[in-house]
Image (cartoon, coloured by chain):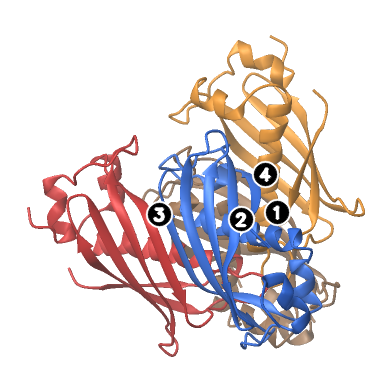
Chain colours: A blue, B brown, C orange, D red
């Protein structure tokens, strides 16, 4: 699957006293874009966690901030898979203000597949195609 | 047990673009004061949840805001049990700025004891004394 | 204006280790429903704050929890004005799971109009109609 | 100034349904460690922002997760300056569980000094020594 785009509206609570969005909010936006990416790819993130017993534990996050997002801005989050194996997957992100397409931030996150006890596992075959992993 | 006091320092992320602490943060402060209240009463909230399999599900929250807290303020949260039965417990709270004892907010929360499946249960006998519940 | 309905999708970060949505998230949902209520009423909350210099400071919040929301649930937040005067406004809320219309929570919040220095002010005439306040 | 260590207690709200601390919380912990670092260095972060009119805007964050933190864990956050100039400063972080010194995460953040309008500025002379910047 290629890149997927999600839109969100900046929440008041996401701002801080600098008058702009707090940097931790961008990690949350990347997360919800991942969930929508999975939904668009035809699989339910909640399902893989509940039925499949497989979770995507975050092992690395990286975010570069180029321009501040502000309260009530509409933001487009583009997400794509940078690389994937049965053990780990890396996502890339680009966040833009919808109004003028201004690039706000870029980011990437690395995840390992793990079970409910937080032990690393190999992604079950049936989910591999969704991440573009060759069986 | 009588009232217990916990101190915390306002975090930057807890402010919003109004330049003061966002109102949702006060619910978080009440929560951490409850945890410290339990610890001071000689029992570990984590233990009751993990070993006892009993959780305090929040069923009602109420908060009145009298003066705004600001970034880096030291805040005192006083918490006490308003009423308790084997089925539910109510906590009262008072939040003051440490520097000048200014009353910032008051609140109360109501909780039901429930199991891991979120079904209401009676609090096991061994924990009742901690909440001042007569066996 | 009558009641307005906003929809949102539960974020992963909004859950806690109880496996359900943390109670503080509901205050955030009420807030974003207020913003959408204002937008639907034909005025921009950001505009009133930036151009009008008027802010809606939260002075009281109340929330009753009837059933837990879970990750990825779609939630409908209904919001309406309970009462309004040039000095303060009260909103009521009802939150339901979209899938089965199950009532999750009800709430209400009270706000005073204030200026950038957090001093109470009367709402300027031009905004009063939006809150259903007779001039 | 050399490394500074801050201690914090994991909040319930910081956990997610995976049963561990959500990854965005680590950015918040790094932030509060920076504030305490500044306080220990003899200057008040709030003062530099309010009186000095200088803010440390975050331009990059990076975090590697090695082991999960859990509710009620005591966490030690070590923070130090990696590099600093009148225009930008980089902090390094190490987060450990206090109980057994287990390394939970490492991170780094890059900041530019800017004014209230979010424009980059040079750090005023009087604050440079605090960041180990030669005048």
Badge 2 is on which residue? B27
Considering depth in this image, is C64 or A99 the residue closer to the camera?
Answer: A99
Q: CA distance from mark 4 to mark 3?
A: 23 Å
Name the chain letter of the residue that bears numbered label 2: B
Instruction: Give the residue at mark 4.
Output: C61
Q: Is residue A120 left or right of residue A68?
A: right
* Residue ID for mark 1: B61
Quadrant of the image containing the N terminus of chain D: bottom left
Task: Locate residue B118, reporting x and y percent.
Answer: 82, 72
Q: Of helix, strand and loop, which one carries label 1?
A: strand
- Marks 4 and 2, how far apart at CA: 10 Å
- Foreground mark, 3 or 2, reads 2
Residue furthest out toward the top: C135
Q: Nearer the viewer, mark 1 or mark 3?
A: 1
Nearest the viewer among B75 and C80 is: C80
Q: Are marks 1 and 2 on the same chain?
A: yes
Q: Are marks 1 and 3 on the same chain?
A: yes
Residue A26 picture location, percent across and down: 52, 54
Q: Is residue A10 visible?
A: no
Q: Are marks 4 and 1 in contact (CB under 8 Å)?
A: yes
The answer to whether residue B79 is visible is yes
Mark 3 or 2 closer to N-term? 2
Residue that label 3 marks: B98
């Amino acid at each position: 699957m290629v890149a997927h785009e999600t839109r969100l509206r900046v929440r008041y609570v996401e701002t801080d006293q600098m008058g702009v969005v707090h940097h931790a909010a961008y990690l949350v936006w990347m997360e919800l874009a991942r969930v929508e990416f999975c939904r668009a790819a035809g699989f339910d993130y909640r399902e893989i966690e509940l039925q499949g017993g497989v979770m995507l534990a975050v092992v690395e996050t990286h975010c570069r901030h180029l321009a501040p997002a502000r309260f009530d801005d509409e933001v487009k989050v583009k997400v794509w898979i940078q690389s994937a194996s049965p053990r780990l997957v890396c996502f890339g992100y680009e966040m833009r203000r919808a109004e003028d397409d201004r690039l706000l931030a870029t980011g990437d996150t690395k995840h390992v597949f793990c079970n409910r006890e937080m032990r690393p596992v190999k992604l079950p075959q049936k989910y591999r195609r969704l991440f573009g992993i060759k069986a």
